[in-house]
Amino acid sequence: MKAVSRKTQPKKTALWRLYLVVGLLLSMLSLLIGRVLSLQILETERGYAFLQNQGEARSLRSAEIPAYRGVITDRRGEPLAVSTPVVSIWADPSRLANSERVPELAQSLGMELDELKAKLVRYEGKRFMYLQRHRVPHEAREILGKRFPGVYGEREYRRFYPAGEVAAQLVGFTNVDDEGIAGVELAYDEWLQGAPGKKRYIKDLRGKMVRDIGVVKPASPGKDLRLSIDLRLQQLQHRELRKAVTAANAESGSVVTLDAQTGEILAMVNYPVYNPNSRKNMKAANMRNRAITDTYEPGSTMKTMTLVAALESGRYTTTTMIDTAPGWIRVGPKTYKDPRNYGEVTLSRVIEKSSQVGVTKMAVELGHEPIWEVFQRFGIGEPMGTGFPGESSGVLPSRPRWYSTEKISLAFGYGITTTPLQLARAYTVFAAGGLQRPVSLLALDDGELPPAERVISEDVAEQVLGVLHAVTGEHGTARKARVGGFQVGGKTGTVRKVGPGGYIEDSHVALFAGLAPVNDPRVVTVVVINDPQGENYGGGAVAAPVFSAVTRGALRLLGVTPSEFPQELAVNRSQLGGAA
């Protein structure tokens, strides 16, 4: 048998391997062609959907279309909060980190280079990070026009507040994501927000958009909100309160004005304030809407309601004589004094002079129960239901045992707490003939009146109005509350502030609660000046003048016709030889 040549054997082996590799490659090619034919021909619809989904997964992206937040306006349509378009600049750290243009980018953004590098390290391995939020569009376009690698922009909205600090504590503000986090913005966030839309686009391998496919779901804008305040009166109050707090070197102050008939809040301001459009040095204390959130002992402003208890008892009328001699009275361990001995005076004059002795004698005879019950009827210690974040309800204590001094101090407005808004709502009862309506932050439709609750009789309300008017007369404590051409009424209050060891001797809160005009009340205003300094720190000296200025402006804006000829004009005309 002939032997196989050694040279022939390797050739056959190599040829066999070649055939094997070629065969395997042809088999794989056949499988691939078969799969493509299966997807394109045999399974046309399903195959197309599969390939489309796979392609979209690699190149098709969705983006959120931000929704325009609803506009907040005053009752006349003046804007208080609007949304303006801005551009947020973001980056893909994986593309930007190794770029030589990072220093140039930092300079364009106005950032420190070390800060930007540290941020890139922090987001290492991520595909998204914000470089800056809410840049003005033309500034953003300038930066994006330099085409930094991995740097992009997205459209958003930023809240702007045209009234600035004048309405800041009422309107509130939003965070960087356009979500309400304070004030009305927070209270009505769901109403104002709207729903974002959705659009699709195709991106390349580097993440850059190459084609905008279009909007899949349009954004739904938020709903507008019309508040009850009048920005003109708001500005007036802001100016007068700032002037008063500054002049008295006080810690803070609040003013709130209500529509006497509807319960709408026509203006509400506090001081100190902040600018919601620039929050770099914003202090938390300045953000509080103190008129709703802060509580104070109302002091002598509550003597008006003690008067109600006296009139309702049937034992007193406004002309009932009360002997206040010798100018002081002792109950239990405490002595209550008047500035001087007023002698025997009418019940009306007791309130006009804010006589501690006269009110003490009434409280002893009446007992604390009917006084407490009147306070409760007026809503002291009850929530007002405004929906405003942080609203306080005040405190009207209810205890099984009362000490003699607690019974008396209740009649003076001590031992209880209210907010300025709550006190204003209580005084609307006198202005509305004994009826009380809920307060409203939102403007009511013309002719719309919320349901009212009768708190006191119309006759008692009318008698109290007469006494309140007398308080601003020659013998009263609120002569500085007068408004030329109009009859006004109100009650002063001056209370000591409470400290860790009890009442502080030289720290006070000055208050005034009033209404105008007395013959047909249209507005109710409460002024609170917290911790005024100097010798003249009382409600009649510090708070009453603010009421006068604010009420004068409010009545003018409401178009109320003067009922009296202004005294100062009469004097001027008589000096000129004209008829008085």
Image (spheres, rainbow, N blue to C red):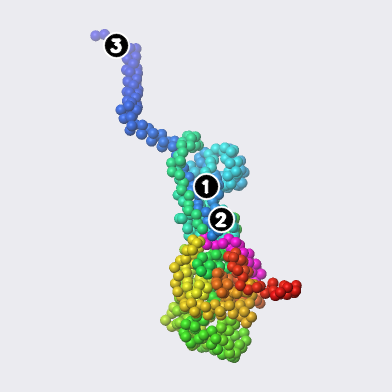
At horizontal 59% and vertical 65% (from top left) the residue drawn is: 559
Badge 2 density bin: few <14, some 14–19, many ≥20, Cα 10 Å: some
At horizontal 45% and vertical 55% (from top left) the residue drawn is: 190
Where is the N terminus found, in terms of image quarters? top left
Residues at badges 3 and 2 in contact (C-beta under 8 Å)?
no
Is label 1 or label 3 in front?
Answer: 1
Q: Position of residue 287 (x, y in %)?
A: 55, 62
Disc 3 or 2, which lies upstream in sequence? 3
Q: CA distance from mark 3 to mark 2?
A: 104 Å
Count of marks, rendered view: 3
* Amino acid type shown at disc 1: Glu
Question: Residue under circle 2?
Answer: 79
Whether residue 248 is in magenta: the answer is: yes
- Of 195 and 400, nearer the camera is 195
Whether residue 471 is in magenta: the answer is: no
Question: Residue under circle 1?
Answer: 156
- Of 83 and 135, nearer the camera is 83
Q: Is residue 220 left or right of residue 530?
A: left
* Amino acid type shown at disc 3: Val
